[in-house]
Amino acid sequence: MTSALMPNYQRLDIAFEHGEGPYLYAADGRRYLDFGAGVAVTALGHCHPHLVEVLKEQADRLWHCSNLYRIPGQERLAERLAEASFADAALFCNSGAEAIECGLKLVRKYHDAAGDPGRYRVITCTGAFHGRTLATIAAGGSPKHLAGFDPVVDGFDQVPFGNLNKVRAAITGETAAILVEPIQGEGGINPATAEFLRGLRAAADEYGLLLFFDEVQCGLGRTGRLFAHEWAGVAPDVMALAKGLGGGFPVGACLAAGKAAGALTPGSHGSTFGGNPLAMAVGNAVLDVVLADGFLEHVRAVGASFREKLAGLAGKHPRVLGEVRGVGLMLGLKCVVANATVVRRLMDNGLLSVPAADNVVRLLPPLIVGEDEIDEAVAIIDQSCAELAETAT
């Protein structure tokens, strides 16, 4: 069948008609346990009642008015994010890549305003993923993502993830910032050590750099704390958010603290749709749930239980699974067989997951998941691994 869609996606031949909580329902009526969550986007599951109610109410009042005018929902969401984080201010956009782009512009503008416009380069790490725009694929540095898009956007110096000595050696008089994911998602669920993040903070302070965290995938409660960097006890100067911030509605945010929070002056950056009333209503509704008493404790408890059970499966099926990685409900299975094969077998058996680099299968369930759904997922993984091990013999 010929499609008018551009052929840039390798889609699986399945279409979903509706979802509820941690489940998706296909056009043929089959139910799937969704542990991909739209790549960590539907953080509160599908059709969360509070999000649905708030979105419908806002849709009846106002969809769009542009950033030519005050948008009270933006003011409220920015205040709440600042109160719950290191930040002093937020700028809203539509996606993670836009949030990273905003941060990259902010970094340059900050140093320009300080009288040092020659500081524009950003240190990034191997295995990183920061988006699909020309600048963000250059920041990520993946040959696969860069192929066909020469010349590569200048301004990025890549070092090995987790190697503080290499980071410090890469700092020059042109360095403006260090950009890193506290937990690499696309790169294979690779958590940075607390020592590495603390060392980055110290290096940034020593050399007058901005520390820029990409928490697009690992933020908003995914690890059992509101932000993943909190586990290391450090704070960035700039941070990008998206994915779970909208619970499925397109929204991103760039947060900043101190003088960096005022770097983007009127006219220096903007977005037609960013922070529109619909997105802000949903973003505030997400925070209503995630910041409620006991919510993050639930994520930590369920995440610890899930990881322990996955470790048991890795020990039981060494011909299929290697190790378990990650924190909270951002977990990965390093596979012995091809991860694409595992993802497909899990789907055939009713569990949705997401592949990642380094032959990893990502498990990113909605944060509202309970022990019953965890046990259901574990049973499917167990069955799938047994089937794959039998095929491999």
Image (cartoon, rainbow, N blue to C red):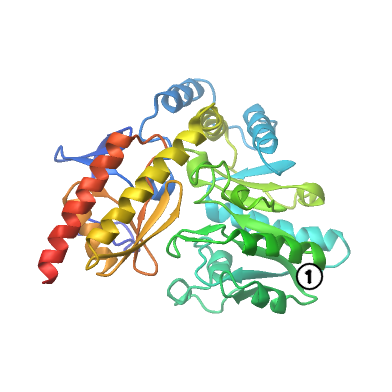
Percent position of residue 377, x then y: 26, 45
Q: Relative to 186, does residue 49 appear above or below in the rendering?
A: above
Percent position of residue 316, x then y: 23, 59
Residue at image x 45%, y 65%? 187
Q: Quadrant of the C terminus?
A: bottom left
Q: Residue furthest right?
A: 115
Kindly state the secondary structure of the residue where label 1 is placed. Answer: loop
Residue 11 versus residue 227: which sits nearer the camera? 227
Percent position of residue 69, x then y: 69, 32
Residue 266 versus residue 289: which sits nearer the camera? 289
Residue at image x 62%, y 36%? 66
Residue picked out by circle 1: 119
Q: Is residue 148 left or right of residue 181?
A: left
Q: Please indicate, yes or no, whether residue 269 appears anywhere in the rendered image.
A: yes
Q: Is residue 166 left or right of residue 372?
A: right
The residue carrying pointer 1 sits among few (fewer than 14), some (14 to 19) or many (20 or more) residues within 10 Å by Cα, namely many
Residue at image x 62%, y 43%? 92
Residue 227 versus residue 266: which sits nearer the camera? 227
Q: Quadrant of the N terminus?
A: bottom left
Q: Choose top left, top right, bottom left or bottom right for residue 81.
A: top right
Q: Is residue 100 left or right of residue 375?
A: right
Q: Is residue 283 left or right of residue 145?
A: right
Percent position of residue 249, x then y: 46, 38
Amino acid identity at mark 1: Arg
Residue at image x 52%, y 33%? 290
Q: Relative to 255, does residue 116 appear above or below in the rendering?
A: below
Q: Please indicate, yes or no, whether residue 248 appears anywhere in the rendered image.
A: no
